[in-house]
Structures are given as structure tokens and as C-alpha cells.
Amino acid sequence: MNILVVGRSGMLASELARRFHESEHDVVIMGRPVLDIRDPRCIRNALDNTGPDLVINASVYGGQTTLEQAERETALAFSINRDGVKSLAEACQIRHVPLIHVSTDYVFDGRGTRPIAEDSPVGPLNVYGQSKWEGEEAIRATCERHLIIRTAWVYGREGRNFLRTMLSLGKDRHEIRVVHDQYGCPTWVRDLAQTILVLCNAVQREPASIPWGTFHFCGAGHTTWYAFAMTIFQSVAGLDVMTVNTITPIPATAYPSTVLRPRYSVLCCEKIRSAFGVNPPCWQDSLAACLREMYPCRS
Ligand SMILES: NC(=O)c1ccc[n+]([C@@H]2O[C@H](COP(=O)([O-])OP(=O)(O)OC[C@H]3O[C@@H](n4cnc5c(N)ncnc54)[C@H](OP(=O)(O)O)[C@@H]3O)[C@@H](O)[C@H]2O)c1
């Protein structure tokens, strides 16, 4: 299949480029300035010039590590996460091209205590979550053949993410304070990209029987930011470059941020398991695999 990925150097877009390079699909990765999702004409040109059989949207504004930015730049967040997504969905619909779009656990308010299913009521707590939710709704209203994949707590060896932030702080400080009362499922970007590849293969093989709609995918099991950090530092203990020796658990209320985050962000992945046979790997195993790649001399 010819696949167009929107979002050039982002964490997921870069990983998709690597995964798809090893696959049978022909992939074009496109982002700014050639393809700015805010410009419908750019989108139309990109689709007409590349003629994709499927489009993957990996572009976003104001994700996990840039939430504050989205609160300040509300109009920009909505122009990319909602209006740009709507234009992309319209362009796909007109050309009968299926769209795979990535969304977030932040569409939920996190007030529950049980893993969250796809049809649970939403309640975004911040601009990023609200704009992503409205982007999802625009796709549902516009593009019949869509797969929306909500994921959470994505990390990898590149890009802005919690793992890299911890490793960087760990080389710089003696003490790090990490939130202990927010729960979620760390997701290795490699596992997410692999899952998207599985979906693309399914679309190629049996397009008529795809159960289009919204699915959750994240690492299996759940943890807190504090326990996630502890696992990271236990795994890299002994590296000379690490200066940190104390990880202090703090409540979310003591974390210096004005942006509300969901307290309980554990996504239920049963639907993608039964529809596509995708089994999310255990988050600790994936973290270990990622760290082995980052520090091969330790494995
Ligand atoms: N990271 C997480 O923890 C997390 C959690 C849940 C869900 N997700 C979802 O996963 C997806 C990928 O996230 P990520 O972490 O890979 O994000 P990222 O690293 O911040 O990358 C964002 C990408 O969006 C592109 N972009 C921004 N504005 C654009 C525009 N106007 N037109 C075209 N492209 C634009 C950027 O392009 P440039 O390369 O030009 O900068 C970049 O490639 C997003 O949908 C996000 O909501 C992420």
C-alpha cells in the first residue's frame, strides 16, 4: 500500500518511518513546511501528489510534555488538533482513503477507578484534551473509514517524553520529585507503531471487514509516574553519568503546573485485542527493551 504519514519529525512519526521502512508498504512522511495541517490546500496537494491508499495522522500540538503551551496558545491548539484534523478527514473522505488517527487518554477526566473503555463518557480537563476530543468528533462526522487510536504516556529513545526527561534530570540533579497519585499505562512508541502497522496490514488484506471506529492501545498493566521513574532509575543504576540518588514521591497538587491532568488514565484495550488480535505488551518488558537499545553495553 502507499501510505502517507502526516507529522515529520515527531516521536511517533519518526518511529513509524522506521517501522514502515522494514515493511512491504511504500511510505511517504510529510510535515511542515510542505504539509501544514492547518492549510486545507496543502492537504489536498499532498494527497493528490502522493495518491495514498491510506493516511496516518501523527501530527499534534500540545502533547504530554507541552501541555502548558497548549493552554497559552489555545487557538493554535484547536487549529491543529481540531480544524486541521477535520480538513484532513474531509480530504480523505472525498478521495475514499481510510484515515488512521492517533488520539489520547486526555479526552477523559480521569475520575474513574476502572480501566476506561472506548465508549466511556469523556470530560477533557485541559485545552489539549478538549482540542483532541473535538478532532476525534470531526473525524467521526466526516470520514466514514477511520480508525482512531487513543493511547497514553508514550515514550521512546527520541523526542520529548517522560523517559528522556527523567534520564536527562538524572544526569543533572541529586533529587527528583515525581507525582505519585496519577495512574496510567506507559506505552513504548515502538509498540504503538507496530500496532499501527498491524492495522494497516488488516486494511490492506480485508478492507471490507474492518470494524472502523475508536480503539484504545497502551502498555499492559498500570503504574504511577513515581513508580515509572523508579523503574527507569533502577534499570540504569550504576551508569556513571547518573547523579540522582533520591526520587521523592509528591502529590499532583505539589507539582508545579497550572494544567489539570487526569488522575486515573488506565485505558482498557480489550476492543483492539478482539478486533485485530493486538496484545499490548507488559509496560515493564517494553521499557526494559527500550533501555537495552539505549544502553546496549548494559545488556
Ligand atoms: N506523547 C505522548 O505521551 C502521547 C500520549 C497520548 C497520545 N499521544 C498522541 O500521539 C500522537 C503523536 O504524538 P507525538 O508524541 O509523536 O507528538 P510530537 O513528538 O509532539 O510530534 C508532533 C508532530 O506533529 C507535527 N505538527 C505539529 N504541527 C503541525 C502542523 N501544523 N502541520 C503538520 N504537522 C504538524 C510536528 O511536526 P514537525 O516535525 O514539523 O515539528 C511533529 O512531527 C499525537 O496524536 C498525540 O496526541 C501522544
Image (cartoon, helix red, strand yellow):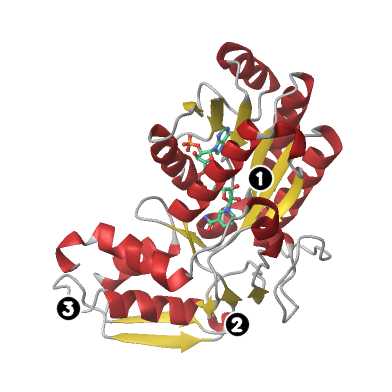
Binning the other alpha carbons within 10 Å of mark 2 as few (below 14), some (14 to 19) or many (20 upward) gives few
**How far from the left and from the top, in percent, is residue 60?**
59, 44
Q: Is mark 3 within 8 Å of ligand 1?
A: no
Q: Residue at x 66, y 67 (%)?
A: 267
Q: Nearer the viewer, residue 5 or 225?
A: 5
Give the residue pinned by disc 2.
253
**How far from the left and from the top, in percent, is residue 71?**
65, 55
Q: Residue at x 68, y 35 (%)?
A: 206
The three-letter code of the residue at mark 1 reads Ala
**How far from the left and from the top, in percent, is residue 264?**
66, 76
Up-down relation of residue 134 to residue 230 (above or below): above
Left or right of 177? Residue 139 is right
Looking at the image, is mark 3 or mark 1 nearer the viewer?
3
Give the residue pinned by disc 3.
238
Up-down relation of residue 234 to residue 91 (above or below): below
Which quadrant is the N terminus positioned in?
Answer: top right
In which quadrant of this rendering is ligand 1 seen? Answer: top right
Q: Is mark 1 within 8 Å of ligand 1?
A: no
Q: Nearer the viewer, residue 199 or 284?
A: 199
